[in-house]
Amino acid sequence: MPDAVHRGATASLRRIRLIARHTLGEALRLRLTSLLVVVGAGLVLGVLELREFNFGSAELKFIADFGLGALGGLGMLLAALATAQLFFNEIQGRAAYCVLTRPVRRREYIWGKLAGIGALLALFTAALGALIAVLLFWRGGNAGAAMLPVLSCACAVQWFKLTLVAAMTLLVCSYSGSALFASCAGLILALTAQVRPFVSGGGHLTWLRLWPNLALFDAGAVLSAAQPPAALVLLGLIVYWAAYMTVFGVLASYVFKLREF
Amino acid sequence: MTPVMDASWAVELIDFGKSYRTGWTGARFRAVDSLNLRLAPGEVLGLLGPNGSGKSTTLKALGGLLAPTRGQCLVFGHAAGSDAARALIGYLPELPQFPLHLTGREFLHYCAGLSSLAAEAATERVSEILHWSGLTAASDQRLGTYSKGMLQRLGLAQAILHDPPLVLLDEPASGLDPAGRLALNRLIRDLATRGKAVVFSSHLLAQTEQLCDRIAILGGGRVLAEGTPTELLGTVQAAAPQPSRLEKLYLDKLGEHA
């Protein structure tokens, strides 16, 4: 007989943490992760060769802009592709059955996956952010160092955006039958959210106002301001992010609860 | 909280049916139709039948991986899939692919954590179960280095790690060599002597005849025949699984070669 089936919030959080740690371990071993980290690092370092195409920007601004652009673009790919791959690897390999037939609730599985992927994206953001910071410091000395608080904020804002993309993809994964469909749909949803300000003017696309606006998490705007955003603005962004993360997480948990294998 | 086993039957399938919608037309495919089965604690039930006869569907329903479209599917009186029922079962899927970067011990610790075993109890239980499944020597090797037989034994180990009173095994012998199959048979029989109810599906008729207290032959989602081996075949089952003459010769030759 099982002698320790705990049903409280502590036990639930413990299982979520276990699934998250396991997911992160798997994620770090994905070839996709290594590939995107190498490409990202290559692009960030490659900025030194591309300085002549800076369209008149100051060198440091160009390095930060270009680096954060690479981080955002590749991070979005990582968020959508890794989420789908990690989710379907376990389902198709039936290892998930060993988890879901235990006293693990479906919502714990979903939140655990999301937390694990969030941790992966945090590491990815921190790694590329650190590389950009090193370049800024190397090229600009004190001027570069002065940009670090803004860069940190911009990286944090990027991470919010990437985790939202992962949450959207996980929602698709919760009902989809294939990793390819989930990856593509996740990316399309992310792109829709990115260009939402251009299409939510009215008419047939008014409903898109319900969809998250990823343009709010614009690292370029943070950089252009040349100082970290005001606390109230940052708090607003965090609340906006948390609200959509909750909506996507709850929806994915509900849909996954109804899923049959 | 300890889940309560408030029924005398480990498994009760009452008029259990499962159908799926298929294709664009949404036509229903009936995987299982009106299945009635009961299994007492300490008994081994073998589900036999061709592919598509409903064996895996039945096991998945008992594991809570899918919901019945008709009838009831009970585990010690609890609806299959409920928290209480899931705390009482161990499940081995067909040909599972475990995370290959983990060692056997790490994987079992992960499973123990998910079953809410306390850290100290988990360490003790993992060592015990590794010994029981004959994997102690390989416990710190990565799963990528395990043979199919070792992975299957690890699968069985994770299924009984939390000491569930009901163990569900989907094609546990698939892909195993004769030695691995024999070892698996002994492990399953050992579970029954410890009072566990075991339900497994198989295509191996000899294995099923040797191992089971009850056999159900499924076809087209229905029970075609069900009963004890004695009732079905008129023979008395051996106390413990014995190798056949060919298996004995095979194992002797392998032993000589080694």
Image (cartoon, rainbow, N blue to C red):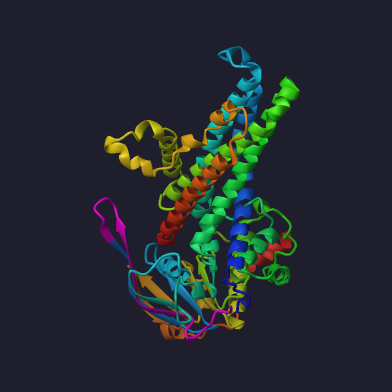
Rendered image quadrant of residue B233:
bottom left
Q: Is residue A30 left or right of residue A131?
A: left
At a point 35% along the width and 40% down the height, the residue shown is: A208
Q: How many marks?
A: 0
Q: Is residue A203 left or right of residue A190?
A: left
Q: Nearer the viewer, residue A220 or B245?
A: A220
Rendered image quadrant of residue A53:
top right
| Spot occupied by residue A136 in the image (x, y as percentages of width and height) | 70, 25
| Spot occupied by residue B132 in the image (x, y as percentages of width and height) | 69, 71
Question: Quick check: is B11 in the magenta stretch?
Answer: yes
- Whether residue A61 appears in this view of the structure is yes
Q: Nearer the viewer, residue B125 or A108?
A: A108
Q: Quadrant of the N terminus of chain B?
A: bottom right
Q: Quadrant of the C terminus of chain B?
A: bottom right
Magenta segment, which residues? B1-28
| Spot occupied by residue B197 in the image (x, y as percentages of width and height) | 53, 79
- Whether residue B243 appears in this view of the structure is no
| Spot occupied by residue B185 in the image (x, y as percentages of width and height) | 58, 72
Q: Nearer the viewer, residue B127 or B237?
A: B127
At a point 31% along the width and 37% down the height, the residue shown is: A205
In this picture, is A237 found above or below B159? above
In this picture, is A210 found above or below B22? above
Question: Quick check: is B136 in the magenta stretch?
Answer: no
